[in-house]
Image (cartoon, rainbow, N blue to C red):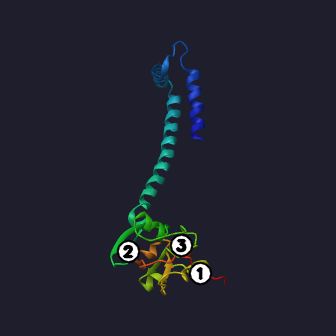
């Protein structure tokens, strides 16, 4: 709408520019427009209202950027996750809400396998949620995840597949142990029995 009005105003200015002045290039056009603007209060009003409309449109864009940036603060968009490796060493990382734990581990060079890249065809992304309180905050595992977990090395009551655990605010501070070994039937030659 604003751009339509702007283009109408522009064509009107060009149409009504003093004919006697030759227009060579933008500088002359700009000067002629300035002189014409000064001599036309109505045109001044229209230009002002267009500027206001454009400014308010830009402000809308700016507001959305700053909202994104406000949301982008670490406190609101990322949670703290602590990996405990097989030697008992803790690795603290920040994980954006919505990202799965396998992806987060890889982004932070943490040695968590992920042979099937999250397609629920292995159990190499096996992690153990160290606190039951956090384990209970997770979504229930699907049947497919449970099937794969059954094949995991060192399965525990709080085991999950990292690629299926999605970061959410309630998980802030969760501690995840990485088992000392993984079992990948695709590589180890283990063939799961059909149910
Ligand atoms: Fe294979 Fe998670 S990476 S199931």
The residue identified by callout 1 is 147
SS at mark 1 in the image: helix
Q: Is 100 or 88 nearer to us in this picture?
A: 88
With respect to residue 52, does 182 lie above or below? Answer: below
The percent coordinates of residue 32 (x first, y second) are 48, 20
Task: Tell me the tag on residue 82.
Answer: 2
Give the residue at x 63% y 83%.
Answer: 193
**Picture residue at 55% right of the left edge, 69% below the top:** 116
What residue is rendered at 59% in x and 22% in y?
Answer: 15
Q: Is residue 127 left or right of residue 16?
A: left
Identify the mark nearer the N-term, 2 or 3: 2
Q: Is residue 137 visible?
A: no
Disc 2: residue Cβ within 8 A of ligand 1's nearest atom? no
Label 2–label 3 contact, CB within 8 A: no
Q: Residue furthest front?
A: 189
Q: Which mark is residue 187?
A: 3
């Amino acid at each position: 709408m604003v751009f339509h009005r702007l283009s109408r105003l522009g064509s009107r200015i060009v149409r009504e520019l003093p004919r006697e002045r030759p227009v060579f290039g933008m500088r002359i056009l700009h000067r002629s427009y300035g002189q014409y603007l000064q001599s036309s209060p109505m045109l001044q009003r229209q230009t002002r209202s267009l500027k206001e409309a454009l400014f308010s449109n830009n402000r809308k864009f700016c507001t959305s950027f700053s909202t994104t940036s406000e949301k982008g603060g670490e406190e609101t968009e990322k949670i703290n996750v602590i990996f405990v490796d097989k030697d008992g060493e803790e690795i603290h990382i920040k994980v954006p809400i919505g990202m799965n734990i396998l992806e987060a581990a890889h982004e932070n060079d943490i040695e968590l396998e992920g042979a099937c890249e999250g397609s629920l065809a292995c159990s190499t992304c096996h992690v153990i949620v160290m606190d039951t309180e956090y384990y209970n905050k997770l979504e229930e595992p699907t049947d497919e995840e449970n099937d794969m977990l059954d094949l995991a090395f060192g399965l525990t009551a709080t085991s999950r597949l990292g690629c299926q655990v999605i970061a959410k605010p309630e998980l802030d501070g969760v501690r995840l142990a990485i088992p000392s070994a993984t079992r990948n039937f695709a590589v180890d030659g283990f063939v799961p029995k059909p149910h």
